[in-house]
Image: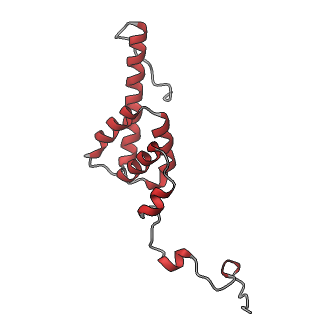
Amino acid sequence: MIKNSGDDSNKKGFKSIKDVLGKSFDFAQDRFFRDKYISREWQGYAVKLAEELNDRKHISLYMKMSREIERNVLERSRSFVKDAVVDSKAKLFMWKVGQLRLQVKNEKLATLHGRSGLKVQNSSKK
């Protein structure tokens, strides 16, 4: 019989996976763990985008964006940020996505109303 030393997580003397693999092991870096839960194309795109922007912490945000925002807007923003030398590529990417979404909205309204001079104000800034 094994005596319990007060540690409930290690009842039978087993080590956790993190202890066995080491604390420096990053599950997001390992292809097996990263691709295990990706079943849709937009999920894979979001993971690649987060890795490219060095922002793995916000993968769920990129998944939502890749599911809801037009792909051409995301691709144009990604290519804009790709060669930029900035502190945070993620912030620049978000800014560019906002600019391009506003531009697309203006173009759609202009074609809808048949006027090229119609502009939409950015509603997020007051």
Residue 52, compared with residue 102, is above or below; it is below
Coordinates of residue 59 in the picture (x, y in percent) = 48, 50
**Location of the N terminus (image quadrant):** bottom right
Q: How many marks?
A: 0
Q: Quadrant of residue 82?
A: top left
Tell me the residue at 58%/81% (across/down).
15
Q: Quadrant of residue 79?
A: top left
Of residues 80 and 72, the one nearer the viewer is 72
Q: Quadrant of residue 102?
A: top left
Of residues 52 and 35, the one nearer the viewer is 35
Tell me the residue at 44%/44% (across/down).
41
Residue 47, compared with residue 125, is above or below; it is below
Residue 19, compared with residue 96, is above or below; it is below
Residue furthest front as drawn: 39
Tell me the residue at 45%/71% (across/down).
25
Residue 91, compared with residue 1, is above or below; it is above
Residue furthest top as drawn: 114
Coordinates of residue 66 in the picture (x, y in percent) = 45, 39
Coordinates of residue 62 in the picture (x, y in percent) = 46, 45
Of residues 4 and 90, the one nearer the viewer is 4
Coordinates of residue 124 in the picture (x, y in percent) = 50, 29
The scheme the figure's colours follow is secondary structure
